[in-house]
């Protein structure tokens, strides 16, 4: 089975240049795909495919859009979330959760109902906080990513 690096259209020095320019990171696959698509579009006559100029330009524009969208996703993944915002949100969440029983005890006379309500609301809000912490790095190396 042929791999990307054993294709007959790539010579050894081209493979080395490609590896040097793109690197060994996980981000190289979409860039390699884009480069191969551009090469295939430019050499469409050798594949015995007839494209008129508008079709070729449209394919090249789709490839450019793909690379721009990929770049936007990578920028989104690598942009850090402001830590002070996260810190203040967690502080207010836990302050609200810890003061909730006092507010509910004044309005509701049955203690067991208050305990159940506070436990369920605390479970829900702290659960949402853990989901937010996981979504901070959705493509990490954790078991559930």
Image (spheres, helix red, strand yellow):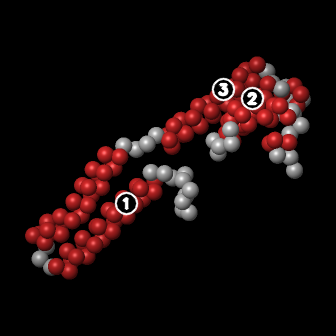
Describe residue 74's horizontal placement relative to residue 29 as left or right.
Answer: left
Q: Going from the N terminus, do you reach mark 3 or mark 2 first?
A: 2
Residue 41 vertical position relative to residue 26 in the rendered view, above or below: above
Crowd around label 3: few <14 · some 14–19 · many ≥20 (10 Å): few
- Any mark on residue 76, and which? none
- The residue beneath circle 2 is 38
Could you tell me if residue 37 is visible in this image? Answer: no
Q: Position of residue 88 (x, y in %)?
A: 27, 50
Q: Are marks 3 and 1 in contact (CB under 8 Å)?
A: no
Q: Quadrant of the C terminus?
A: bottom right
Question: How far, Cα to Cα, is label 3 from label 2?
Answer: 10 Å
* Quarter location, residue 31: top right
Residue under the image location 68 percent in, 42 percent down: 24
Q: How far apart are marks 2 and 1 (CA)?
A: 44 Å
* SS class, disc 2: helix
Q: Check contact, mark 3 vs mark 2: CB within 8 A.
A: no
Q: Distance between the residues labelled 3 and 1?
A: 41 Å
Residue 128: image tag: 1
Query: In the image, residue 16 lies at what x, y percent?
Result: 78, 34
Q: Residue furthest top?
A: 53
Say which residue label 3 marks: 61
Q: Is residue 24 above or below residue 17?
A: below
Q: What residue occupies the far left of the structure in this picture?
A: 106
Write the residue at 28% across / 72% down: 119
Which one is closest to the eye, mark 3 or mark 2? Answer: 2
Label 3 residue SS = helix
């Amino acid at each position: 089975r042929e791999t990307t690096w054993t294709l007959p259209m790539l010579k050894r020095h081209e493979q080395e240049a490609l590896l040097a320019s793109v690197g060994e990171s996980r981000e190289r696959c979409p860039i390699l795909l884009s480069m191969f698509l551009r090469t295939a579009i430019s050499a469409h006559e050798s594949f015995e495919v007839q494209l008129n100029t508008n079709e070729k330009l449209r394919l090249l524009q789709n490839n450019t859009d793909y690379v721009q969208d990929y770049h936007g996703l990578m920028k989104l993944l690598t942009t850090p979330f402001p830590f002070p915002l996260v810190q203040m949100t967690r502080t207010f969440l836990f302050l609200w959760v810890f003061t909730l029983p006092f507010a509910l005890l004044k309005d509701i006379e049955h203690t067991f109902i208050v305990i159940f309500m506070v436990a369920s609301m605390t479970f829900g809000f702290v659960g949402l906080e853990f989901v937010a912490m996981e979504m901070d790095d959705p493509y990490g190396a954790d078991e559930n990513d």
